[in-house]
Image: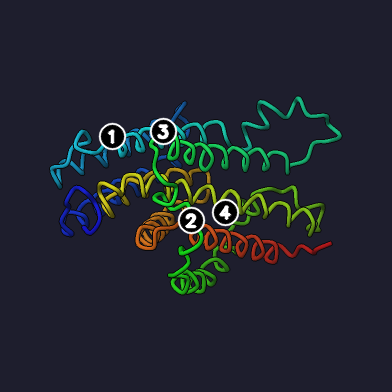
Amino acid sequence: MENGSLDIKSRAFWSLAAACIAVLVPLNWSWYAWGRQIPGSLALYIVFASVVYFGLLRWLTGIRFSDLSHEARFIVVSSMVLLMLFLGFGRSDTYRAVFEEYVPKDARTPLLGFAYFATCSVLLRLVIPYLLVRFKLRQPAREYGYVVRGGTQWRWVYVALFVIMVPLVVWASTLPDFQASYPQTRGVIVGNEVSFRLFVLYHAAYFMMFLSGESFWRGYMTFGLGRDLDIAALPWMVMMYSIGHYAKPILEVNGSIIAGFVLGYLALRHRSFFLGALLHWSIALTMDLAVLYQRGLTWH
């Protein structure tokens, strides 16, 4: 370990990461098999995964939750609460169930549900964490990755990752699960045509979702716990990150484990989450375009 205030040997980190993955993969499958039928299951999964991580951390390194700094403990608890709120109330299905009836029928569009989703994402995953960093923890925002200038020094790594991902994305776009999930809103499709104007608006909101997501996962959570544990904070963030993908195709949920470790490690090393957001959005844009092409839709 290089930067964490609590010393963890490399062997212990790899054991911790492997043990967390061994728990996470069957946990992910269980949600699709039966877990989602339990009321409040997402909150239960978040709590269970966190308890597992800190239990393994104690067992493999001797570090207890109480050994962490006040700041790190606050980050863990507040992250879990914000994630529960976002997954429980911040998605489009909440808009449809609670708010859509108050919107005049002639003004309704699927884009409103996605706009609600994007707004909740920015509020709960970017704005509130930023305010907590600045005014509760009284830390410089730069310390949590809120920086663009100077945060692009590893750009060639992100370009290489994008090139590697494109063939995988194109292949995934042919699978029924991905064709049913993307684009994230059907509001851009009218009949057999895709509205170019609406697609641009949709992806502007989509980028803000990825920026807020990266600021939350790789910024607030990773940098917050990483101040004490350095890269040993990654397994906890990855467990939360993977659970945050529930409702997407299971292949993507499990693929997020690898993505979480890679993006988290890179963010810690060059101290910014901005390029991770740009990479994430670029891959999502590629997926949308590939799915629309596979479906044979035209543009207008």
Residue 218 in view of the camera: no
Where is residue 143 shown, x and y percent of the image?
39, 50
| Measured Cα–Cα span from mark 1 to mark 3 | 12 Å
Query: How many marks do you count on the picture?
Result: 4
| Measured Cα–Cα span from mark 3 to mark 4 | 42 Å
Estimate how packed mark 4 is, as few (under 14), some (14 to 19) or many (20 or more) residues with alpha carbons within 10 Å: some
Q: Which residue is mark 4?
A: 177
Where is residue 161 shown, x and y percent of the image?
46, 70
Residue 265 falls in which quadrant of the image?
bottom left
Q: Pick the residue in front: 8 or 163.
A: 8
Residue located 16% across and 41% down the image: 63
**Residue type at numbered disc 3:** Lys
Residue located 26% across and 39% down the image: 52
Residue 48 falls in which quadrant of the image?
top left
Q: Which residue is mark 3?
A: 136
Per the image, label 3 sits on a secondary structure element best described as helix
- Classify 108 as above or below 170: above
Circle on res. 147:
2
Q: Which residue is mark 1?
A: 70
**Circles 3, 2 touching at the beta carbon (< 8 Å):** no
- Classify 207 as above or below 98: below
